[in-house]
Amino acid sequence: MIILPQIQGVVARSCHPFGCQAAISEQISKSLSQQSASDALPKRVLILGASSGFGLASRIALAFGPAKAATIGVSFERGMSEKGIGSAGWYNNIFFHEAAEKAGLISTNILGDAFSAETREQVAKAIEQDLGGQVDLVVYSLATGIRPNPETGEFWRSAIRPVGETVEGYSVNFEKNSLDKVSLPPATEQEIDETVKVMGGEDWLSWIQFLSERNLLSTGCETVAYSYIGPEHTHAIYHKGTLGLAKTHLHNTRDDINVLLENIEGNANIAVCKALVTKASVFIPGLTPYLLALYRVMKEKGLHEGCIEQMNRLFYSKWQNHTERDEENLIRIDDWELRDDVQQEVNALLAEMTPDSFAEIGDYKGVLGEFLQLNGFEFPSVDYTQEVDIEALKTLRP
Ligand code: NAD
Ligand code: NA
């Protein structure tokens, strides 16, 4: 079978397994060349949300960079079925694991709903069996639109909306190569509450409580969750909207987790990342014009980073250096994005950008290219005209 990209709006309905493999190898080579001044790196790491975006990059950075960490990765992905080839994250898990084994690194994939009690039990068992009973770092990198309410069996659903005002903006459509007008009405109270349930800190805290009660966290254990703040221009749709309120909840939860970890001298952290093209971020209505402008400016200035560059910088230059934190004790790897010179140029581009000019004014080619690469397409090293052996792929397990 020949596998081609199938894009619906901002969602990829197909992926190319060998392109996913190429993406993993590219990221691995970027971590292999890292150096660290410190020996105090985490050796046993649990990653929640390990199959794509920042979670996958964290896993690669920690396993293949100087930490050489053993990893357990939890994710929610689909394999091949009559419905299709499966998700990119499924193949990312497979090829990460294959590369880790080849390098002599311990790696375990757990496929399941990270919100469920069953997945917690599976993780506990894997920490006992594969990591010798404890972890040194828990990375919390879930991005999802739904979370089951264990009491009712129904779902909380996030709604990405402004709060208190209607916001007009534009969202990209990768299927039609267009920038479409969107009008976002203000969130209702219920939408705000549910978004905080799904993307706030409650589940992070509950994971750390669970692991702590089971004595699965080592002395001095760290945990980190990822956040976004962004510049003034995006505040109405992000920072001051429902997602921003969920992130504020996440930041406050860090303080609760720090109290919980006191007896083991542990530490909870928030790393504020830069805006990047991921499966989750292209879904945020109104954000794309900013991404298009930001990509162009940061590339022109030689400051562009993808997930792996961000995570290498987080773990190998920012992590140990507590003087680099801001007044709220947040780790800022959005520092380059928020530089004045970057933001001034971004604002100038945004002022000119229209549905007719977005592809020339912003880096549409680059943003679309990264989106396709997330799904295994557009890798120069892959020959996309070759038949893919579906039967052979079916035998691969994460
Ligand atoms: P992503 O969609 O690439 O990754 C999400 C991960 O969560 C995947 O591994 C997926 O399998 C997993 N997941 C989702 N639901 C799950 C479930 N129920 N059970 C188990 N696993 C599940 O997203 P991302 O952009 O890497 O986002 C990760 C974090 O980084 C989020 O907190 C996000 O807000 C934050 N962040 C993203 C950006 C950005 O621009 N992309 C910027 C700053 C911060
Ligand atoms: Na992730």
Image (tube, rainbow, N blue to C red):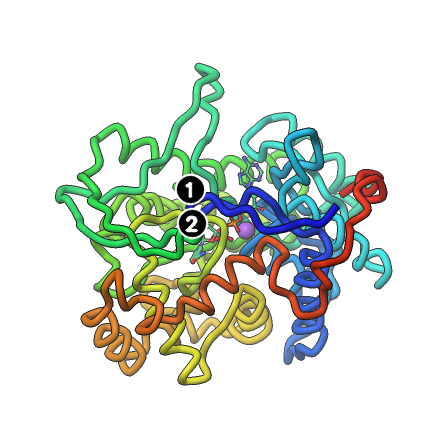
Q: How crowded is mark 2: few (under 14 residues within 10 Å), some or many (20 or more)?
A: many
Q: Left or right: where does residue 234 sit relative to residue 3?
A: left
Mark 1 sits on what residue? 201
For the residues labelled 2 and 1, the Cα–Cα distance comes to 8 Å
Q: Position of residue 201 (x, y in %)?
A: 42, 42
| Above or below, 185 relative to 52 | above
| Amino acid type of the residue tagged 2 in the rendering | Arg
Q: Residue 254 carries which label?
A: 2
Res 242 quadrant in image:
top left
| Amino acid type of the residue tagged 1 in the rendering | Gly
Residue visible at 40% across and 62% down in the picture: 275
| Above or below, 298 relative to 239 | below
- State if disc 1 and disc 2 touch (CB < 8 Å): yes
Q: In which quarter of the image is the C terminus?
A: top right
Q: Left or right: where does residue 269 sit relative to residue 35?
A: left
Q: Which of marks 2 and 1 is nearer the N terminus?
A: 1
Q: What element carries label 1?
A: loop
Q: In which quarter of the image is the N terminus?
A: top right
Residue visible at 44% across and 50% down in the picture: 175
Q: Position of residue 219 (x, y in %)?
A: 64, 53
Residue visible at 40% across and 52% down in the picture: 176
Res 25 quadrant in image:
bottom right
Residue 261 visible at all:
no
Residue visible at 72% across and 58% down in the picture: 385
